[in-house]
Amino acid sequence: MSSSSESMEANAISDLNPSDLQIFILSGQSNMAGRGGVFKNPNNNHKQWDGVVPPDCLPNPSILRLTATLRWEPAAEPLHADIDVKKVCGVGPGMSFANRVIRRRVGGGGGGGALGLVPCAVGGTAIKEWARGEKLYEEMVKRAKESVKKGKGNEIKALLWYQGESDASSEVDAESYKANMEKLIHNVREDLNLPSLPIIQVALASGDEKYMEKVREAQKSINISNVVCVDAKGLELKEDHLHLTTHAQVLLGHMLADAYLAHFAAPPLMDH
C-alpha cells in the first residue's frame, strides 16, 4: 500500500462518524475481554497472543469498534487490547457474535445497518467494582452514551455481560451476586435511559469450585424482563482451567448471537 493510500485510510478511520449503527456493549471480566490464543512464551516467560484469528472472527466492513479514545474504527481482534490494558488480550466472543448476527440478519432478509461494538470488559474484576459510582461502571456508561452520540440514528441494542469468576471464591460474594447483578441491570438501564435494554449474560464456565455453582445459580435465576442467560458450562477451557480457548470463544459468540436474534431481533430471523 502506498503512503498516500495509507494516509487516506487513516483519515477515513479518524473521521469515521457512522450513522444508524446497531450498538452492542461488551462488558464483564477476562472471558469477555478475551484470552483465546494467549500463551506464556517459554523464552521470556511473558504472555503474548498467538495472533490466530478464526474465520468467524475476521474483520468485516460492517463491524466497527469504539476505541479507548472514543473513536469508531474498523473492528479487529483483539477487541479489548486498548481497554483491558494491564493484561494481554486475545480472542473473545465479540467478533464471532457480530459476524453471526450480520450473516443471519442478511441471510434472513432482515437487512440492517452496521454493528458497533463497545468493549468495556476488564479482567479480574468483581461485580462490586461494577457498582454505580465505581470507575468501571461509570466508564462503561460513558462509553455507551458516547457511542450513541457519534452518529445519527445510532441505537444501543443490547449489553453482553460475562463476569462472575472473581465472585466465586467467597461465600459472601457468591451469595450477594444475584442482588448485585439485579442492581447493575436496574442502574445501567436507568443511566442510559433505556428501561427495556436487552441484557444477555453468560453463566460461568469456570471459576473457584467452592462457590462457582452458587454464582451460576444466581445468574440463571435472575427473572427480569428482557434479561436472558446463555450457559458457557462445558465449553473448552485453556490449561489454566479458567479462560476459554479460541474455539470456545467462537462458539460462545455464536450462542450470544443466537440468543439475541431469538429473543430481541424483530422480526425473528431464520437461516435461508
Image: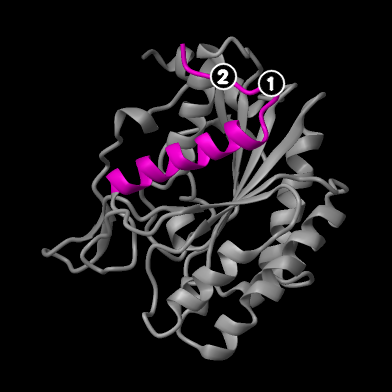
Of the numbered discs 1 and 2, the one sitting upstream in the chain is 2
Q: Determine which residue is flagged by label 2.
A: 105
Taking the image as shown, residue 125 lies to the left or right of residue 237, namely right
- How far across and how far down the image is residue 221, in percent? 61, 65
Q: Residue 75 carries which label?
A: none
Q: With respect to residue 5, does 85 lie above or below?
A: below
Q: Distance between the residues labelled 1 and 2?
A: 10 Å
Name the image quarter holding the N terminus: top left
- How far across and how far down the image is residue 22, in percent? 68, 29
The structure residue drawn at horizontal position 41% and vertical position 45%, both measured from the top left corner, is 252
- How far across and how far down the image is residue 247, in percent? 28, 44
**Residue type at numbered disc 2:** Arg
Q: With respect to residue 170, does 103 lie above or below?
A: above
Q: Determine which residue is flagged by label 1.
A: 267
- The magenta segment is 246-272
Taking the image as shown, residue 206 lies to the left or right of residue 148, namely left
